[in-house]
Amino acid sequence: YFGIENWALSLFSMVTALLLSFSNIWWAYANMLVMYKVISRSQIIKSLIVVLSQLLIANFYIFEYGLIIGNVIGLLISVIVLFTTFDIARVFKESNYDSIKRVMEKYKAFPLYTAPQNLTGYFLDNFPVFIIGFLYSPATLGFYFLSKKMVQIPGGILGSAVKRVFYR
């Protein structure tokens, strides 16, 4: 996506996507087991590590990928915290091929309805960011993204907390 000249940014983006997928899987599994304390602890740790690592990288190193590296470090620590809180033998015992197949057959219509909705929501939410990134300077894009996040914070905090509880 970012081209050959920015292979490091592409690599960090792929690692971030992979770690985000792992953390979402573990959060969903913890939610299924009603382990809200574990979910809360891992999200707090992730947020603290992301902010601290981004600030440390920004203060001690002038590095253009500092925000992405901070996000990768926070996600990695969060996945490690989630991974270490589970009894791995129990996870593999409950997650055999037959149980996964049973769940897939039972809920096979769920992705058919949610995938298009999520894809459309993602593109509509991020379309202005892509357009501003192509038409304006990175500073303008940064100000837009910051203001967008500031507006979304109050609803996001309450919405994500309620969503996690009722997701089951």
Image: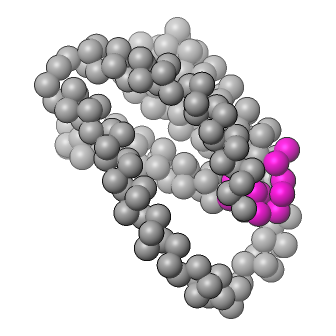
Magenta-colored segment: predominant secondary structure: helix
- Total marks shown come to 0
- Could you say which quadrant of the image residue 62 lies in? top left
Q: Residue at x 55, y 50 (%)?
A: 19
Q: Does the magenta stretch include residue 28?
A: yes
The outermost residue toward the bottom is 98
Image height of 109 relative to 165, above or below: below
Which of 54 and 131 lies nearest the eye of the viewer?
131
Which of 22 and 104 lies nearest the eye of the viewer?
104
Is 2 on the left-hand or right-hand side of 159? left
Image height of 114 relative to 70, above or below: below
The outermost residue toward the left is 135
Residue 95 placement (x, y as % from top left): 72, 78
Image height of 141 relative to 104, above or below: above
Q: Residue at x 28, y 13 (%)?
A: 139
Q: Is residue 107 magenta?
A: no
Residue 4 placement (x, y as % from top left): 20, 43
Image quadrant containing the C terminus: bottom right
Q: Which residue is drawn at 80% across and 67% down?
A: 88
Residue 137 placement (x, y as % from top left): 20, 17
Residue 11 visible to the viewer? no
- Residue bounds of the magenta highlight: 26-37
Q: Residue at x 53, y 81 (%)?
A: 108
The colour style of the image is one colour
Residue 132 placement (x, y as % from top left): 21, 26
Residue 36 visible to the viewer? yes
- Could you say which quadrant of the image residue 54 lies in? top right
Is 11 on the left-hand or right-hand side of 165? left
Is 36 on the left-hand or right-hand side of 149? right
